[in-house]
Image (spheres, helix red, strand yellow):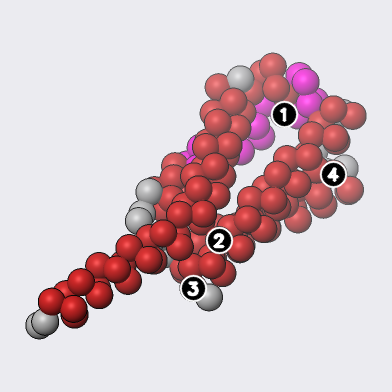
Amino acid sequence: MTTSQTSARPATTAGRAAAARPLRTFLALDAAVTAVNGLIYLLAAGPVGDLLDLDTGLLRGIGAFLTVYGVLVAVLASRQVPSAVATKAVIEANLLWAVASVATAVFGWFDPNTVGTVWIPLQAAVVAGFAALQINGLRRLVG
């Protein structure tokens, strides 16, 4: 192997790592917001349930799910170059969450109060925003 061949390989790896930086940032932000939100739902289900007029058991379940999901997204974000397949799964999960949240608000599922009815689509917009950023980050990486 010649010197030029040896040095070309790290440059490609370094180039992919640099291209992955925005995606990693968007995944890390998603992970942090999701995990914190999950911990709040999990540990403060009573006060949050009172604020949103939602069942504490529902909030604890959502909180446990979001906390675990946030940790898994953080693991993905920690990779020098996140897996495209895993990133697509995160994007799809985020889009599904956003659509389900809007449907929850529109159809009045779980019967939240006004604060809850406002909160649900607001957090859906944040999740959809993360999905859009992650789509763009993934395009930069694979495109």
Side of 109 where 8 appears, left or right: left
Secondary structure found at label 1: loop
Q: Are marks 1 and 2 in contact (CB under 8 Å)?
A: no
Vertical placement of 91 versus 36: above or below?
Answer: below
Q: Quadrant of residue 137?
A: bottom right
Labels 1 and 2: the sequence-earlier one: 1
Mark 4 closeness class: few <14, some 14–19, many ≥20 residues within 10 Å: some
Please give the range of residues in magenta: 50-70
Q: Residue at x 58, y 58 (%)?
A: 134
Residue pointed to by mark 2 = 137
Residue pointed to by mark 3 = 142
**In this rendering, does residue 63 appear at all?**
no
> What mark, if any, has residue 55 been given in the picture?
1
- Mark closer to the observer (1, 4): 4
Q: Give how far across and how far down residue 116 sits, in percent.
A: 81, 31
Q: Are marks 1 and 4 in contact (CB under 8 Å)?
A: no
Labels 3 and 2: the sequence-earlier one: 2
Mark 1 closeness class: few <14, some 14–19, many ≥20 residues within 10 Å: some
Q: Residue at x 13, y 76 (%)?
A: 3
Q: Are marks 2 and 4 in contact (CB under 8 Å)?
A: no
Task: Tell me the amino acid under the disc marked 2.
Answer: Gly
